[in-house]
Amino acid sequence: MAGIGFELKKLFNEESYIGDIKAYIFAGMVSSGPWIISIASLGLLWMFSSSYIGAEFQKLFRATVVYTFAYSLITTGAIQLVVTRFLSDRLFLRQRNVFLPTYVGLILLTVIIQGITASIFYYFTEFDMYYKILGVVLYVAVSCIWQTMIFLSAARDYTSIVSAFFWGCLVSVGGAVLLGKNYGFDGHILGFTIGQALIVMVLMYRIFCEFDSTIECNFEFLTKLDSYFDLLLVGAFYYCAIWADKVIYWYAKGGERVGTLFYSHYPYDSCMFLAFLTIIPALANFLIDVETSFYEKYRSFYGSIVNKGALSEIKKKKGEMIKVIRDASSRTVLLQIMVTGTFIFSAPYIIHLLSLQSKHLPLIGTAAVGTFFHVFLLIALIFILYFDRKKSALLVCFFFFVTNVLFTLLVIKYAPDYMGAGYAAATFTSFIFAFIILFRSLRNIEYLTFTEQPLVNPKLPSESVEGIEGEGKAK
Amino acid sequence: MKTDVCLILEGTYPFVHGGVSSWVHKLVTSLSDVKFSIIHVSATGDIIKTPKYELPDNILEFKEVFIHDFINEKGRTHGSKDNAWKTLSKFYNGIAKGDFSSFHEVYDNVINLNKRSLNTNDLMFSKKSWKLMTELYNKYAGGVSFVDFYWTMRFIHRPIVGLLRTEIPDADLYHTVCTGYAGLLGILAKIKNNKPLLLTEHGIYTYERKIEISNAKWIHSDEEPSLRASRTLGFFKDAWIKKFEILSRLTYDYADKIITLFEGNKRMQMEYGARPEKISVVSNGVDIDANLPLTAKERRHTNNIGFVGRVVSIKDVKTLIRAMKVVKDSIPDAILYVMGSGDEEPEYFEECKVLSEMLGLEDGIIFTENVDVKDYYPNLDIVVLTSISEAQPLSLLEAMSYGIPVVASDVGACRELVLGKDEEDANLGPSGKITNVGNAYETANAIIETLKNKELWEQFSASGVKRVKKYYKNDSVIDSYRDMYESFLSGRK
């Protein structure tokens, strides 16, 4: 991920204030572009489609898409960290030629597994065959999108990702509207699916251009599931945690049943998804900090160990590194306060935009506050993974999952009026927990780095030093 | 099972040949009425070693411990361990000043297993151990490469920590045959069982480790080699040497009696901190009645040169091979028999063979590997030793008992074996020649002169036999140990 940051730094050096803004937007787009585009296209479709399909079908469509996104993210999210790690290790070993075979293997696996799961799910619905098939295709396509994005991120081909999403979603919206007007609901969903499939195809095409090697299957990453089992669980728990409160609300009071198996909770879902967009500017800012100033300090810290520095020098570098983390975090706090504040102040307009009732005003506030803490939870988690503390990351994600389930259930039971408070409480406690763990690890980072080296079958010092350096470079 | 004497050995009997091994074997077989147990410290259990000796019946128990096999004691013991850490800190700061007196406290508060003592996990991985390590780093090592400091500390301590939990056989007397790790086990046994500890040191452990470490390439050196001719070997090599110095020093402190082979070794032990009143000299001995020298008539004088010993770098066999090149030029029918195993340092053994081929000595040097040297002695005309370090080499004594002149480098007790240790001894006449370490040319000349001058040869031969008979009879060595054992064991509780 280093390359993009340095490119951003160039942007900062070139221009003044306007340049800054451009860099932020750019970083925002690459980190969260797909999200914005997807949500924007869903919003557009919501506005257009009411004219030619009924409200009932609108809900069904929205539920289908939300289910598809939620479950595909949860199921693929588990393996994504493992594959990311596998790829960055390979990249460090300069084995780029395994990328394409690994990609083919992963996609094959995704198509088969996700195809089967979706088929089983749709088998129990009452839809007609046509809708069932499209539903399965959409689910598989979206799953493939997430998997493909890991590979393009590893290749730092962010512009391809964003432009593929832009054009794909444009086709999704256009196709849905056009086909929907002519062929009704069936046409609507067909048009949308075509757009998503286009995204997959464009991204795939980029991959085949990027990694020019023989096309074969490689399932080597599966052999790493064992050693990266912690990462697998980190991914699984994180995505489960993110969706836990939403799923609970679907089945709670105010949630409604759409079709036979779908559930949704319109006010909750729409406020949460919209509030989640406020993560973007802060994450963008953070991305720049990490990729530029933090990464330099991080390298020079591990460098001071590897290059036989004295303890005082190692500690000095550690201090500098921690300072960068503190600075980056506090800058992000300021920025996030402004964004969240603006969002909350515009709550009345948002209510209007989403055609919600005014009793949902507090929901917008809690959703925004929850997202506010979510940003810092995510930041802490990224740092924890940067220092390769997989067990700690797992603990944080598990904590987030448990608190989100627990607090959401408690709020529904004892304070049903405070919708979203469960999520906010969960992100708040988890973020505190994550930062305590992060700073505790950081305080002892040199101790942990040294002591956790194996003792029973010791590598010679030089080898283990390379190991440390490898960890650093692999990021 | 309780025995009279527990011998504590390190890297020797019954797995390798050599002076110490044959000494142990002779001691145990001769004192057949004493019940022995043996605890042997080895590097690792991964390599299967075949014993080179058959253990006599009076060895009732044989136990092996491995310094590289580390079993971590997981789990925490409860309660504050601050006192243990304080003791440990005091000990390290003490030894930095040359004060070893607080080891007893270390045993009580740190090693001796109880709720407040430290388990191996505490010692190797805990936050407190890191704290102590960085404290020592800041005080004594500030500025050196920390990554090397850490690994040096880890490697230095790992075998020691691993040995702390060794279960030592029950005995009334502990007899360690070197300092080092075996010495540490001896100390632990002495404190734990409240029994006396006897130390017999053949080669001086600290000195031998020093030679090894100076030549080691795997220890990081901070100093630029070309910048200054420094007195020290660099921080990390010094640290390793320091470790062995400390182990030796502690063994000296805890031993009730220290035996060494000759005066020169006694002086060295005193230099490394042993108190002189504890030290007695008991030299090696040979079985003079079994090794009858041949009469001048029986001897055939075939210019056979013998080397008796393990083929290892400390014996510097290469210098002897180079000397052979010179000898061959002047005595073309000379043949060198290298009699000893190359198992211990196979690479060195191979290098020796390659060197002799490179010098065109294929016909002049025969590597016999393991043989019964007794079959060869009668046909040897001279025995040569070019070691870098020796204690009191049995091979020289044996050669002399057979009436074979010797040429030996000026190390250990070689000079006094060849030229006599005092005036009375010197009056017996030299039994061979002494050369400088690593000097192939000088060695060659000594060999040539001895072999070519019949009169000189006869004189060396006769003096050797006389000297062995007078000072180095095996019976008297065994008698000394029997007496010593008896004096310790008579007071047993």
Image (cartoon, grey):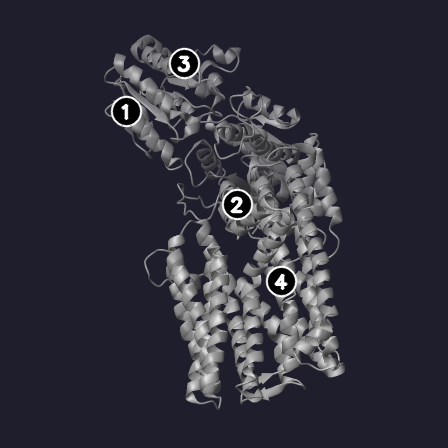
Chain of the residue displaying label 3: B
User: Which residue was labeled with disc 4?
Assistant: A280
Q: Residues within 10 Å of mark 3 (few under 14, many from 20)?
A: many
- Cα–Cα gap, marks 4 and 3: 89 Å
In the rendered image, the vertical position of residue A449 relative to residue B393, given as above or below: below
Chain of the residue displaying label 1: B
Q: Between B113 and A162, which is closer to the camera in this rendering?
A: A162
- Cα–Cα gap, marks 2 and 3: 58 Å
Tag of residue B358? 1
Q: Between B210 and A69, which is closer to the camera in this rendering?
A: A69
Q: Between B162 and A351, which is closer to the camera in this rendering?
A: A351
- Asked if both marks, 4 and 3, belong to the same chain, the answer given is no
Tag of residue A356? none
- Cα–Cα gap, marks 1 and 2: 44 Å
- Cα–Cα gap, marks 4 and 2: 32 Å
Q: Between B315 and B72, which is closer to the camera in this rendering?
A: B72
